[in-house]
Amino acid sequence: MSRRTFLRRGSSLAALVALPLPSSSRAPSRKVFRYAFRSAETGFDPAQISDLYSRTITSHLFDSLYSYDYLARPARLKFLAAAALPEISADFRTFIFRLRSGIYFHDHAAFKGVKRELVADDFVYSLKRFFDPRWKSPIATLQEFKILGLNELRQQALSEKAPFNYDLPIDGLQALDRYTLRIRLAESAPHFVEVLAAPDLYGAVAREVVEAYADTIMAHPVGTGPFRLVDWRRSSRIVLERNESYREEIFDGSAATDDSNMQKVASFLHGKKLPLVDRVEVHIIEEGQPRWLAFLNAEHDLLDRLPDNFVNVAVPGGQVAPSLKRRGIGMSRMLNADVTYTVFNMKHPVIGGYTPEKVALRRAISLALNIQEEIRIPRRRQALQAQAPLNPHTYGYDPDFRTEMGSHDLPRAKALLDMYGYVDRDGDGWREQPDGSALIIEQLSPPDDTNRQLDEIVKRNFDKLGVRLDFKYGKWPELLKSARAAKFMLWGLGSSATGFDSRPALQRGYGPAAGGQNLSHFDHPDFNRLYDKIRVTPNGPERLALIREAIRIWVAYVPYKVHVHRILTDLWHPWVTNYVRHPFQYRFWEHIDIDAAAQANDG
């Protein structure tokens, strides 16, 4: 299937069929949704996290101003804490947000018995926290948008080595009254509202709670979202329960008119009070086989992203296997709004740098990596080759666009290394650096079966190039910490879009975001200049031209080698209804419904 044909077809949901299954002792009175993460979380403070798994949890605990409609395609904003779309000045520099009244934080001792309502001051405080040096926030987006006075307040705290002054009024971030928030920017920002449609990051926190827990706030999230954290065993188990203080939230979304299954889900959800389940249990299972077996044994209700090595068993030819179909297993497949890549540490003395020989080394490695082999073998053809850093479904993504990033040319890669002095001087079969010292590349990797199969392909490609490659294995949080501190050489990972704007994908190469979203620590003045223009330019031909020029610089210097956009297959048991994968949104558990009796009968 061609890339464009796949995009046109979009996602599809299989019909749900309920079959009688073995009995169980589980009481059917409570609706419990059971689920698994592929990697460990880092914590649950929006200002301090950036990984997908932590952000999936926080998106269900906190409310931002906006989110995305669960069923609308193309994606469309919906109101969470906001009562309406903002009033925006003609120059896109002033935004006035009206909040809904009657939204409350879940009950907590920090509120001293008072029912605590969410107000505009909570957003003022929460957004300021991203600028407080104490929290070392990896999210630099708000700093880029230059909220008047906030960067200066941050610099004051840094220069004076004093606590961040949350009580000092600033012109750019003000609560005009209890339910009105005004944000003023130094520059035009046509895409600013989309930035705030992220409950996982820009949900409001309560100052009383943060001050009560101080440096342990990562373990004590208190929000206004549909669920609350009740149990956390780090890197093992996370349990959420329905937030009893949650507002009267009635589903009023819409479905894509040309998708009958989406219409069916819309019909199921219409008029329902959210959330529909009482409890969510999340287990951390990094290996694909036990995650697959747990689903087969009905220990989990949904298998989010079927491991690639079980695709031919579970969905041969793209259809649910007969054995699973007889059990009523449902399926959806979608080209994900993600991109996987190898990140090069631009600060490393061997692999980093901007001189011709360093660029040649990275370009040679990029050309030597056989992405089609990766797609064919470990990914079981469940991916499309990426050509640029943009994510599918985002602005500017073109399935027919081609760059050198999508090329595999081993002879050219070898010629590049020969030309710049990376040759085998001692005859041991491995190339040395131009100065004669050993050339040994080290790549970070999680120790799970999926990554081991990918690592085998990468190692084979390096061997063919004549470059020695070693792996350093570790858990996700530790690897992320090393990458942020620029204490690594290579790392293979991926990133998913959280909205239609393609700017966040390019932020991975933006100098001021180094150590946050920009794990390569790439810092090129021409790229930074283009990124700044992209941020303030409305969608249209001018912005597209700027994006293409930024990509050209990215391809030339190779701070990252893009690999694939993944095709995700999700499976669920027949007692699960209303599941639809959203291209951007992590927050979906409130829409899931569970037939507790059928779930209990399966055991």
Image (tube, grey):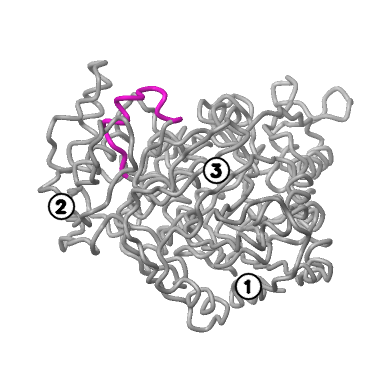
Q: Residue at x 74, y 41 (%)?
A: 287
Dot 3 falls on a residue whose secondary structure is helix
Image quadrant assignment for residue 228: top left
The residue wearing badge 1 is 13
Q: Residue at x 40, y 48 (%)?
A: 243
Q: Earlier in the sequence, mark 3 or mark 1?
A: 1
Disc 3 residue type (three-letter): Tyr
Q: Earlier in the sequence, mark 1 or mark 2?
A: 1
The residue wearing badge 2 is 180
Dot 1 falls on a residue whose secondary structure is strand
**From the viewer's perspective, is 410 left or right of 85?**
right
- Locate residue 513, reporting x and y percent: 41, 38
Distance from disc 1 to disc 2, alpha carbons, whole Å, reads 41 Å
- In reply to whether residue 423 is colored magenta, the answer given is no
Disc 2 residue type (three-letter): Thr
Task: Indicate which disc residue 53 carries.
Answer: 3
For residue 451, above or below residue 213: below
Magenta stretch: give its range.
Answer: 204-219
The outermost residue toward the top is 161
